[in-house]
Amino acid sequence: MIVVSGHFRLPTDRIAEAREPMLEVITASLLEPGCRTYSYAEDVTEAGLFRVYEEWDDRAALEAHFATRHMRRWQEEREALGFHDRDISIRETGDSDPF
């Protein structure tokens, strides 16, 4: 399994405008083959900071995700919204046990 995690920032005055495009890319991504989890979460202690968490079956599914129309559109939209301070990593994991 592939885990994608990290964060990005948006200017606080653009967050309301960003919600619909974020919802669209999340909804479309969750329908992709190999996508187990795809989420953005706004940090409650730091305005404009969004946490990213995704799970994919394998790297092929993740690579296919980057080539989708909705992901390319989100990349354009987020730049126009002032997206910055992106720090995201990709990790390959094995099976896990419940905690």
Image (cartoon, rainbow, N blue to C red):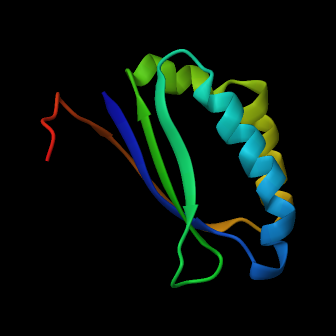
Left or right: residue 34 versus residue 24 is left
Rendered location of residue 69, percent (x, y): 78, 26
Residue at 66% x, 68% y is 84
Left or right: residue 59 versus residue 69 is left
Residue 40 shows up from this direction: yes
Residue at 46% x, 17% y is 60
Give the answer, above or below, for where 69 lies relative to 91.
above
Give the answer, above or below, for where 55 lies relative to 87.
above
Q: Quadrant of residue 36?
A: top left
Q: In which quarter of the image is residue 40?
A: bottom right
Number of labels in the image equals: 0
Rendered location of residue 54, percent (x, y): 46, 41
Residue 86 shows up from this direction: no
Rendered location of residue 6, percent (x, y): 44, 58
Q: In which quarter of the image is the N terminus?
A: top left
Give the answer, above or below, for where 8 lies relative to 3.
below
Left or right: residue 89 versus residue 19 is left
Left or right: residue 94 versus residue 17 is left
Rendered location of residue 87, percent (x, y): 48, 62
Residue at the far front: name it: 98
Give the answer, above or below, for where 18 lies relative to 54.
below
Residue at 53% x, 40% y is 38
Q: From the viewer's side, name the closer residue of 54 and 78.
A: 54
Residue at 77% x, 32% y is 70
